[in-house]
Amino acid sequence: MRILIVDDSRSMRMILKRMLADMGHTDVVEAEHGADALDRMLESTPELALVDWNMPVMNGLEFVTELRTKREYDKVKVMMVTSESSPRLVYEALKAGADEYAMKPVTREVIEDKLQLLGLG
Ligand SMILES: [Mg+2]
């Protein structure tokens, strides 16, 4: 399964990438912000995107909103992975089209649980 990690923090991308590798997922693409992610998706469509909220250029909410205007990406599952924890923001992200929401700091167990919920486990 191809997974796209979208986060402006290089260390966060590395942590997630290692976690996914430990779970057997090695087909991982990285992007630094939402616009970068949309570019990467033109090359190959992931089955899952792990998306940070606060990023320059295009933030996570803007990314998921834009993504959900494109029919060709209907099947892409989006999981917000963010330290933003207010219920209002969670609601906003889900309303915009995110499928799941995980709070930083995330653990492998949390990611695994969420993948199960998304039917990707
Ligand atoms: Mg960030």
Image: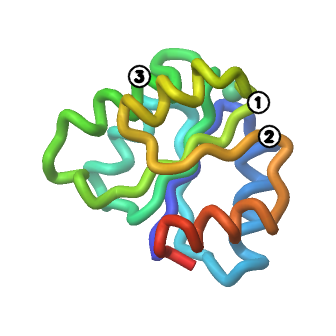
Q: Do the residues under discs 2 and 1 have CB atoms within 8 angstroms?
A: yes
In the picture of the structure, the residue carrying the numbered disc 2 is 104
Q: Quadrant of ligand 1?
A: top right
- Of residues 89 and 45, the one drawn nearer to the viewer in this rendering: 89
In the picture of the structure, the residue carrying the numbered disc 3 is 62
In the picture of the structure, the residue carrying the numbered disc 1 is 83
Relative side of 62 to 42, left or right: right
Report whether residue 6 is seen: no
Mark 2 Cα shell of 10 Å, populated few (<14), some (14-19), many (≥20): some
Amino acid residing under circle 1: Ser
Q: Do the residues under discs 1 and 3 have CB atoms within 8 angstroms?
A: no
Q: CA distance from mark 2 to mark 3?
A: 19 Å
The extreme left residue here reads: 71
| Quadrant hosting residue 54 | top right
The answer to whether residue 23 is above or below residue 102 is below
| Quadrant hosting residue 25 | bottom right
Relative side of 45 to 9, left or right: left
Q: Earlier in the sequence, mark 1 or mark 3?
A: 3
